[in-house]
Amino acid sequence: MSTVASPALAEVLRYAAVAWQSFRAGRSLDRALTNAIANHPELRPAVQDALYTAVRHLAAAERILTRLAARSPAPDVAALLAVALAQLQRQSHEAHTVVDQAVRASQQLGHAASASGFVNAVLRNFLRQRQTLLAELQDDLSVRYNLPAWWIERLRSEYPGGWMQIADTQQQMPPLVLRVNAMRIAVDDYIAQLTKLGIESTRTGMYAVWLHRPRPVAEIPGFLEGDVSVQDAGAQLAAEWLDAKPGMRVLDACAAPGGKTMHLAELGVTDLSAVEVDAARAERITENLQRANLHARVIVGDAARPDTWSVTNGAYSFDRILLDAPCTASGIVRRHPDIPWLRRPADVAQLTKVQSELLDALWPLLEVGGRLLYVVCSLFPEEGREQIARFGERQPDARRVDLPASQLLLPVSVAEPAAVSAWQGSSLPTLHDGFFYALLEKTG
Ligand SMILES: C[S@@+](CC[C@H](N)C(=O)[O-])C[C@H]1O[C@@H](n2cnc3c(N)ncnc32)[C@H](O)[C@@H]1O
């Protein structure tokens, strides 16, 4: 715990509050952060930490504010309070330091002096009533799991026996998992290198290595050389399960930032096309491929409109298609805790429609006997099981192929003993996020 007032804390809280306000208006946390500190990149680590702490305490902060404030504060004041309340809950600074620095930050908001008085009063009231307030909120599921009520209802109705474990796992800090580039180094040799450097790790999948302590990518041995990339072990199953052989024509239909494209290239796929609708994100694919000296055709285009882009000048078809479709991302909440708060209930139906349009548009591009692997990092059945059942009804020439393991992967916590014991060659990694997979073969 820091006992000295960090001179930067007021500044950190202020910029975190700017980002918070923009996040609550609908921007992703990463985008909001980047915009807020555009002129102060040196503040990024501290502001990011404060922001992610706030999002992990969002439901509690909003309930506390409703109880403690007689009137709704202006949005910038509410944002500052959300960020400061989260700091008080996390207790990584002395409470009085957080209060003083939050008041100092509020003086720069451009309100009358009453705003600072208000911030001071709310935070001090929280400290006085902390035990009672937190006890009162204990039975509030939204606070307990830090999820909106509608999200909890969806989880509960699909996973009546297991939703609490899913929600608990999703509140934890995400494990840092690497994918070892099979072209450059064997997984066990890489782990031996880490051990020599004193870096603790566990093999958790065919190509997956979990670093017990997170570190910036530039400090991961072999990252800059392309020996390893950061990718959840559940996501690594896509390239494995697509089972593309050298010589096959392969399409990665929704490809940015290129994690799965890279993996396919690392497994020896040479005729590889990566389509991405967002031009800026498509650049990330190119950068990622370059880092590891890998090759793929990167195409900026709408995968749902194959008539508007082409891989070659003539007709084209594929032996393998990977459709890693846009989705609610309900399976990767521990990596993106902002997601449940950015989505609206209506988004589920809207994304389900986009996914079915992508499936219908890509299916004609598949050769007879070819395979399409559909994947979403979602746990909601509309995007997974039900989506594929409906597709099967529309496309009688689509045969569901068995996968080596269950098609639904529920997120695994590092607290589960099996997750942290070394992988023994089974078809599933021991530690992973939540995904739905379906492999479809074209029969005629
Ligand atoms: C789940 S992410 C893909 C992650 C990627 N496969 C990886 O492993 O790094 C989905 C991507 O699809 C893109 N996307 C969404 N709609 C698309 C469309 N109609 N055509 C092509 N790309 C699309 C999004 O911009 C996003 O980058």
Image (spheres, helix red, strand yellow):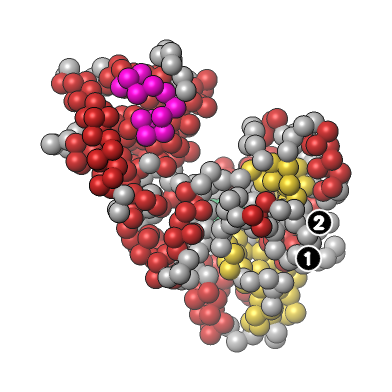
* Ligand number 1: quarter of image: bottom right
Q: Residue at x 68, y 66 (%)?
A: 321
Name which residue type carries label 2. Leu
Few, some or many residues within 10 Å of mark 1 (<14, 14–19, 20+): many
Name which residue type carries label 1. Ala
Q: Magenta residues, as a range? A: 87-99
- One can see residue 229 in this view: no
State the SS at label 2: loop
**x, y percentage for residue 168?**
47, 54
- Residue ranking furthest to the left: 70
Which residue is denoted by mark 1 in the rendering?
Answer: 244
Mark 2 vs 1: CB contact within 8 A: yes
Which quadrant would residue 216 be assigned to in this image? top right
Q: Residue at x 78, y 60 (%)?
A: 424
Which residue is denoted by mark 2 in the rendering?
Answer: 267
Q: CA distance from mark 2 to mark 1?
A: 8 Å
Q: Nearer the viewer, residue 176 or 249?
A: 176
Q: Residue at x 60, y 87 (%)?
A: 396
**x, y percentage for residue 11?**
39, 19
User: Is 130 displayed left or right of 26 in the figure?
Assistant: left
Q: Is residue 23 above or below residue 421?
A: above
User: Is 350 displayed left or right of 123 in the figure?
Assistant: right
User: Is 436 displayed left or right of 96 in the figure?
Assistant: right
State the SS at label 1: loop
